[in-house]
Amino acid sequence: MTLTVVPVPGLPEVAPGADLASLVADGIAMAGIALADGDVVVVASKVVSKAEGRMVTEQPTPGAEAHRLAREVGFRPADVELILHETTTVLRSAPGVLVTETRQGFVCANAGVDRSNVGQEGAALLLPSDSDVWAGRLRDSLTQAFGVDVAVLISDTFGRPFRLGQVNVALGISGMRAVRDYRGQVDADGYTLHGTEIAVADEICSAAELVMNKLDRVPVAVVRGYDYPRGDGSGQDLLREPAQDLFR
Amino acid sequence: MTLTVVPVPGLPEVAPGADLASLVADGIAMAGIALADGDVVVVASKVVSKAEGRMVTEQPTPGAEAHRLAREVGFRPADVELILHETTTVLRSAPGVLVTETRQGFVCANAGVDRSNVGQEGAALLLPSDSDVWAGRLRDSLTQAFGVDVAVLISDTFGRPFRLGQVNVALGISGMRAVRDYRGQVDADGYTLHGTEIAVADEICSAAELVMNKLDRVPVAVVRGYDYPRGDGSGQDLLREPAQDLFR
């Protein structure tokens, strides 16, 4: 079956406390999309953070650890302090890069603190506190608005080891499972597949990124035609246990 | 613009030395797709390996290192020997997992040696020797067959640190750049974007994976509607220099 990925442009600037579900529903309707059962609505974490009011405009006072790391990585101490507020573990630090585990359990650069497209000079945007809660809330609203059963993913752009460039991944999930599990299934040759678990929620977010241009504000995309694994998934399902991770 | 991802099913079993370009072209035509300028044709590395004759049916004799690693990871020594043949560096080893850098420079589990869907009991399939060469060859043939300018990606399924599940990435590239580079560009708020390089070749392969079902043999997909960065890219462009990698 053909998969389609439709961009939803033209959302207004999202203010703290805005009714994001209504803005997304209006955007989808104005894009001429008749939302249907089985669609996946992918929403950029940036607009979720804005609705949650995760914009920081005041510079925090850097502590000793922030000063020390700032010298090592070459960031401003106040910026490092802000990153450390959002961090449980600093995994790596080197000139120009700070890889951290965030309070939400995600491993990414600079704890996801973002200064681009935040709508205000000098401001920084933090990751949503709980992307699964936001995904669930948006799904409930879209179900009510359109009378259909859809899945919702909250997406952000992360780097990764070994490979250059960043790709979009899923931070929050509602209405589908994170992973398609082929383990124990039999392939076309009768061979039982071992160890094949595909992170389809991440792949859907990567597909959506291709239409969510960073320069033009397209914070939502609708993915249609993918028979996603039904169930009650979470963005946390995609996080490897630290003790099971060979690259910590 | 809407992105579409169309599966190309029904390729016959690919024999060593098969004319893969013709099989792919026939499959595309039989799927009713009129290939157009700007399409991206994604081909599973598995069928490329089969055409190249990278199937191994004989068990190699394990050396001392293979015996030692086999005890540690719990694989058969001959399987480990086969993996080591394809490996330049063993990055990590632990029960059930061997993370290696392959001769081609990819970091993945078991040097990409694959025992599923290989078409023969007890056989193993190795990664293509040079996926860029294959991508270029397929692109030349498709250009000639259809009279259009397309890009070709050779794709495989890799795990990654920190996040569970596997996603598809690009091993070989022809006709497009691997990465879309936003650095120095100005966002909707006038903020100059720093450090945003999107691995769009990997994202396209992840999108294609969603229609390339592991159980039903769909080794090709056509991605339409993505204005990919023109240029002369390579799968090697996506590989982080070992010295620049904080997680080696």
Image (tube, coloured by chain):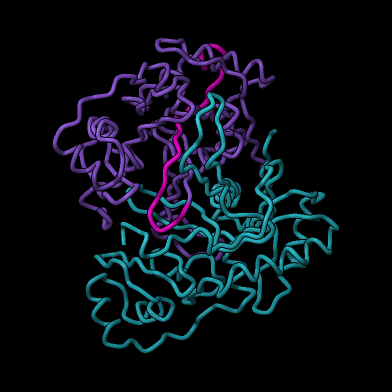
Chain colours: A cyan, B purple
A97 vs A248, nearest the viewer: A248
Magenta region includes residue A125:
no
Residue A47 at x, y = what percent? 61, 67
Q: Nearer the viewer, residue B61 or A78?
A: B61
In this picture, residue B155 sits left or right of residue A81 = right
Q: Is residue A2 above or below residue A45?
A: above
Q: Pinpoint residue A163: horizontal percent, then vertical percent.
A: 35, 47
- Total marks placed: 0
Question: Image quadrant of residue B89?
Answer: top left
Q: Name the residue: 37% across, 60% down.
A: A244
> With respect to residue A34, does B168 lie above or below?
above
Range of magenta residues = B142-164
B117 sits to left or right of B221: left
Q: Residue A224 location in percent, x, y?
A: 71, 44
Q: Which quadrant of the figure has residue B77?
A: top left
Up the image or down, B102 lies above or below A221; here it is above
Q: Nearer the viewer, residue B79 or B33?
A: B79
